[in-house]
Image (cartoon, coloured by chain):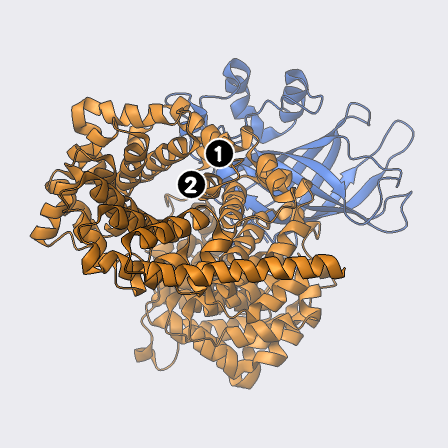
Amino acid sequence: MPVRVVESNAPAQVSGSDPGNRSPLPPSSLLAAGQAFSGTQNVSNQQKEEAWRVNVQIQGVDLEHGYLCGTMEALNVPMADTPVITFWEGEIVDGKNYTFYTGKWEATREDDMRHWSKFPSFAPLQGQVESDGGRQLDLTNYPYIFMRWKEQYFVNVGTDCGLTIAGFYYVCFSCSDGSISGFYYDPNSSPFQKLELKTVNEGRSGFSFSSYELQ
Amino acid sequence: MPTTSSSSSSAASSSGNRQADVFSRLASSDPEVKLKALRYVKNQIIGNRTKKLSFLKLGAVPAIASALSDSDCHNNSSILVQSAAALGSFACGFEAGVQAVLDAGVFPRLLRLLTSSDEKVVDAGARSLRMIFQSNQAPKYDFLQEKNMEFLFSLLNSENENVSGLGASIIAHACGTTVEQQVLCDAGVLEKLVVLLDGSLSQREACLESLATVLKSNPEAVSRFVGLEAGRYLSYVTELTKDRYPRTRLLSCLCLVVIYNTSPSYFLNMGTKSSLVTTLLELLNDPGQSGDEAALGLSSLIAEKEDLQKLAYEANAIKNIVDILKTGSELNPKRLQGLFFSLAELCSKLEDCRCSFLSLEVLDLLVNALRHKNADVRTAACICFRNAARSVKNLSAGRFTADHVMLPLVQLLHDPSSSVQVAVLGALSNIVLDFSSPKSTFIEYGGIKQLIELSKSMDPNARCSSLRALRNLMFLADNKRKELFYSEVKAQGFASLISDPEPSVQEQAVALLRNLVDGCLNSIEFVFDEDGLILDTVGRQLRKAPQAQMAIQGMYVLTNVASGTELHKEAVMQQLFPQPQAESNNFMLKFLQSHESQLRSATVWTIINLISPSSPGALDRHVKLRNEGIIPQLKNMVNDACLDVKIRIRTVLSQSMSFGDN
């Protein structure tokens, strides 16, 4: 689908820095429950080049709490007989619930900056984030959404499958075409494993959307 | 054993004889004999529910009532005092007793005791009436009648603490409407009640109860109360939450909960909120009535308030409540209801709470409560299930789909209580969301058929909830599941659901259709069954200027259909611009001008799919859209306030340019 990339709007600044008063990010129709993405994760190391095919499905989005979750399916994992599915939960960097600083999962501020700065769309924000952690940034009109995805459990295999979900992903979602890039961070794994995903259309000539409503 | 049996039988028989004998003594013309009999009954039944029931069955209440009404005894104050006390004792915390006292027709006589010149008689009458006024069965009291208001004030002004307490109890019992609250406030009842706060324990408690009644959901009354002596009494009630008597602590908490729920601006202090939560949590451990009421008070306090839910969570509320539920002792239904409601509120918004709740292995407790004989408890347990099942993490992990959980829930769809039915539909709506797990216990138990049946209910809530459940069940469903559903409902049935008179039901029906036509390409064919009856119905509804929420779902149906083949896209064009033209009102243009950004977004997505460059007819459709004013409208919206809409419009315009449209 030839979609023109929207010019990168410079992020606005907010007056006041009380996170409690911030608005959550507005909904983006491609980052919604039911949306599916497909692509690869590069797991190459010094010994060999390797990439796993990856499918992601978003199962829940709660912008008010800066939360989203879904599943990730790795298809050609060498040591597994079947595709490996994990359930992950995400933190949306909205300045209200979460900032660019992770503050956990063994990630220092330096680790955060090293990863975020790998996304070209982070460049216009970098200075502000370095000076005050991005507290003055208003990301509500920025056409990219930054997130951290942390896998929580294996869905279809046991924990003894020889795989680890100890790390987490720094993720950048493009609102215009729904593409996702990410970097896996785990101090004990190969650094900067790159995740690249695009929206999936199930053989359709266009986009299709489902929805549910929790009572 | 023979010996024991014989002795117990003889004891029972002797007790029966004594009770029978009492009746003849109650009817005696000798005042001394009558008095002794009255004392005997009163002493027997005090605090003893079994004895109350036993005497009640033997007809003691009418016998005592005649002793009270007997004209020969009018001057015998001892008989009046004892008979009033015995009747009050029957009524105390015992609904069948209240009923019997009222049935005996003695209520007016008790009221007349208040005019006696003998202080002891007045006191006994007031005590007895207070017991009656603690029950919902007590007669309604019309404050709007002037003489009743005068009488009420005469009670409140009394020096006798039981009489003034009775005045407060009457208010707590009978004040139910805003008009009544207003009339009482205008008459100066708040000023009278606050005086009682300084009185005896019983006056204070009655006063706290009536204050809560007069202030409930009435901001004007609250403002008047808070304004009394510059907030002194609000502070005083707050102080009383630390009183040494649990009942006083409870009633002052409940009064503050009412004030907070009515006018939250008086509670800006986090410390007050926190101490209110902590006190109510402590009171949950009280084994008596206060503990029962504290549970409902807590749920009312934290309802819909995320900050207070967080405070309660941090104060270990979930663990405390679950520990009480796990004690194994039989809990009062009112307490159970309050505890489940509190858990439900805690799980309503915060994912941490839901995960913490479910980690305590509570599902079996909830399942047991689904089978409780009291409908209020079953309803509360369903609501608790529903809110805990808002956790996508736990839904995705299949935490609720075990047979022993699903079966009782499905069975409750046939519950005789409609509130249980609606509540279980709410729980099932969430629980059926299994993200297309290949196996669905719900479907295996025949859930689809039952939901379709309920979607035809007379009750719009049941129709709406059952359709929401079906919508969630069809979210990302495979074709097998969709076929199963469709074979039960068929095109005609679906068209009727979409044409429901209630907008909220229409919305759910169309959202269900949206899910049905999502997924694999073949799914789109459902809307073309029976000459496209379903798609025609959606188009007709969209042309009728529907409410925004229904229109959003309708436009997503068109978007999903338009993401299919050339034929599908043309069918959507037919709905957007039907022939003859007169039938068309260009609803798409109206939707693009809607204030609802999601409706604008859904509409733009339909356009994106219609002019998708991979489809051969895209150019012709673009021309039609331009001629109908849609593309020019989008050009006006290039700086739409909503980022998502703005991005999608730019996609359309970029495509438009590739068709040579500048």
Kind of element beneath mark 2: helix
**Foreground pick, B483 / B151:** B151
Residue depth check, mark 2 versus mark 1: number of the one nearer the observer? 1
Give the letter of the chain under mark 1: B
Reading the chain from its start, which is encountered first: label 2 or label 1?
1
Q: Position of residue B575 (x, y in %)?
A: 43, 74
Left or right for B558, reference A88: left
Asked if marks 2 and 1 touch (Cβ < 8 Å), the reply is yes
Left or right for B643, reference B186: right
**Foreground pick, B658 / A114:** A114
Residue B561: which disc?
none
Q: Position of residue B584 (x, y in %)?
A: 33, 74
The chain whose colour is blue is: A
Above or below B96: residue B188:
above
Give the letter of the chain under mark 2: B
For the N terminus of chain B, which image quadrant?
bottom right
Above or below B226: residue A6:
below
Q: Residue at x 10, y 41 (%)?
A: B187
The answer to which quarter of the image holds residue B270 is top left
Which residue in the rendered view is the most extreme toward the top?
A131
Question: Callout 1: 10 Å neighbours few (<14), some, many (20+)?
Answer: many
Residue wearing tag 2: B297
Answer yes or no: are tags 2 and 1 on the same subunit. yes
Type of the residue with mark 2: Gly
Residue wearing tag 1: B283
Kind of element beneath mark 1: helix
Q: Residue at x 56, y 53 (%)?
A: B381
Left or right for B543, reference B456: left
Above or below B307: residue A126:
above
Above or below B90: residue B641:
above
Can you see residue B414?
Answer: yes
